[in-house]
């Protein structure tokens, strides 16, 4: 009986460590997104509001507001995500390879934008169509 209690307590402490590690990663990622929004002149707290943050991402990319609707169309949202990622990379004077990295590996490339030396330059006004 005693060995069962030892196994149970050690496995629950392992879960606790994983939860703390997960929370640390989430907080780091939120802080990186906050920094990206602030660099682009948008409110950092916007990272917490689910649909509003997509609206802000469209603004940062220089795309019209109605592009937000395209994120809710299946399969179209994949292409729109790539276009937005490429536009954001361009707005931060990064290469198209960095844009693909934002699209595929955002959890790595967003902290690079947020905590790195990249400066935001507002994109020229794109066509509203």
Image (cartoon, rainbow, N blue to C red):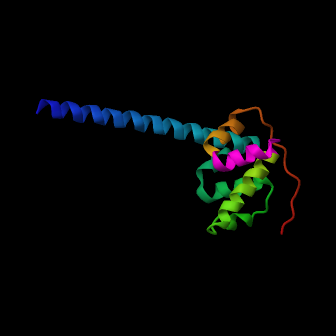
Looking at this rendering, what residue extends furthest in the left direction?
A: 1
Instruction: Tell me the residue at 23%/36% (across/down).
Output: 8
Q: Is residue 72 left or right of residue 87?
A: left
Instruction: Tell me the residue at 81%/55% (across/down).
Output: 62
115 vs 56: above or below: above
Magenta stretch secondary structure, dominant: helix
Residue 28 coordinates in the image, percent (x, y): 57, 36
Please identify the quarter of the rendering in which residue 69 is found: bottom right
Instruction: Tell me the residue at 69%/63% (across/down).
Output: 68
Q: Is residue 22 left or right of residue 49?
A: left
Residue 125 in view of the camera: yes
Residue 103 coordinates in the image, percent (x, y): 67, 50
77 vs 122: above or below: below
Residue 113 coordinates in the image, percent (x, y): 71, 38
Please identify the quarter of the rendering in which residue 17 is found: top left
36 vs 53: above or below: above
23 vs 6: above or below: below
Quarter of the figure with the N terminus: top left
Please identify the quarter of the rendering in which residue 76 is found: bottom right
Residue 34 coordinates in the image, percent (x, y): 65, 42
What is the count of numbered marks?
0
Q: Is residue 42 magenta?
A: no
Quarter of the figure with the C terminus: bottom right
Looking at this rendering, what residue extends furthest in the front direction?
A: 97
Q: Which residues are magenta?
A: 91-105
């Amino acid at each position: 009986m005693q060995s069962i209690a030892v196994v149970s307590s050690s496995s629950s402490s392992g879960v606790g460590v994983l939860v703390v590690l997960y929370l640390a990663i989430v907080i780091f990622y939120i802080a990186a997104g906050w920094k990206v929004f602030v660099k682009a002149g948008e409110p950092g707290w916007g990272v917490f509001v689910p649909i509003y943050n997509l609206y802000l991402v469209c603004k940062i990319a220089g795309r019209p507001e109605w592009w937000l609707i395209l994120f809710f169309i299946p399969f179209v949202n994949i292409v729109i995500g790539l276009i937005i990622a490429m536009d954001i990379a361009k707005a931060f004077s990064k290469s198209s390879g960095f844009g693909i990295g934002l699209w595929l590996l955002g959890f790595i490339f967003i902290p690079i934008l947020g905590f790195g030396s990249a400066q935001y330059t507002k994109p020229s006004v794109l066509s509203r169509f």
